[in-house]
Image: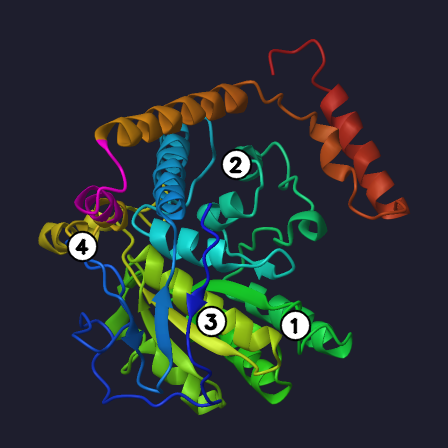
Amino acid sequence: MAKGDPAGTARGRRATTRSARPGGTTPGTGDLVQLLTPDGDRIDKVTWHDGTEYRVDFTDEEYRGLYRDLVLVRKLDAEATALQRQGELGIWASLLGQEAAQVGSGRALRTQDMAFPTYREHGVLYCRGIDPIMPLGLFRGVDLGGWDPNEFKFNMYTIVIGAQTLHATGYAMGVNMDGRTGTDDGEAVIAYFGDGASAQGDVNEAFIWASVFNAPMVFFCQNNQYAISEPLERQTRIPLYQRAAGFGFPGVRVDGNDVLATYAVTRAALDNARHGQGPTLIEAYTYRMGAHTTTDDPTRYRIASEVEAWQAKDPIARVRTFLTKQGIADDAFLAEVDEQAKQEALRLRERVLEMPDPEPLTMFDNVFPHGSPEVDAQRELTARYMDSFEGSAH
């Protein structure tokens, strides 16, 4: 687990933007914050357009911890995809390719911060210390997700596109009303969403409310280039981070395949929020290497050369190259991490297969905290219907 803090200068309330470029165009030099190149070369510091300086100061142990996180998260995700393909999960939304965006931002959260995920933030969930079996129970249909949002400061998965940004903004407004901002120990809130969700009304309404009420919010957009099958250029005519200026708060684009830059940018935005400086929009420029979900076929709407170009920017490969170049990790460490990932994935598979199928009537449990005559009547009707099949081949 990485603990090091980025150093940065304070910045104003509004970001200075560069000339617009089509949303689907890969950013060039100066168009995004990057601290680790695809070749594994370390950049000491980067200054964004508004004068904010981003850098990180990690120990060798913390660098190795970030690499371990990335490898474990990818392996667990791959195991979940395999389980779905084998009929053990109903559906799965893979994070393949987006590990750095999730681990970098997840590790940037302080203990008191609250996160509101979509249905793909398995890496952030892992960083918050939640048992990785939890989302698999949801997608297997065994439960609705079993973690306590108050304990882990990580809300339940949200399937409705963009709805969590409103939930997060309302929560953040409450943080302000409770006086839990303005100090180093203040609470900040982060909401995750994708580039497709940025076109939803809920997200834009959240931008308005967060801005007007100066909510301690970080809007973290994982721009993975596709809203299912629709490419980014069909969603926006300007880079997504530039939209923030129209709502009155700063926006910044970070290399979402760079775990160091993602950490630095997210930590700085969260700290600004907790100190009462209001919301920030982070656009993590990344790529979904796999399918939108296991019901999707990405070969129908994108070409192989595009995927290959992004594979050259793989978030894990660049960290591994950096570690070996700098002598921070040797072959023995890399092999040990791979073995740990393999064993944890195996244990995850075993636990999924051991999950008991819920009794059908349990769907009526916990609908209301104190019960309901209507739900009780529905339970009774369902029970009689099921009893009617006794002794038959059904």
Give amino acid for label 1. Ala
The residues tagged by marks 4 and 3 sit, at their Cα atoms, a distance apart of 27 Å
Residues drawn in magenta: 319-330
Report which residue position mark 4 lands on.
Answer: 310
Report which residue position mark 2 lands on.
Answer: 132
Residue pictured at 65% horizontal, 59% vertical: 112
Report which residue position mark 1 lands on.
Answer: 172
The residues tagged by marks 1 and 4 sit, at their Cα atoms, a distance apart of 35 Å
Q: First in sequence: mark 2 or mark 3?
A: 2
Q: How many labels does the image show?
A: 4
Give amino acid for label 4. Trp
Residue pictured at 48% horizontal, 26% vertical: 348
Give the image location of residue 86, x and y in percent: 38, 25
Q: First in sequence: mark 1 or mark 2?
A: 2
Q: First in sequence: mark 4 or mark 3?
A: 3
User: Which residue is nearer to you in this view: 118 or 19?
Assistant: 19
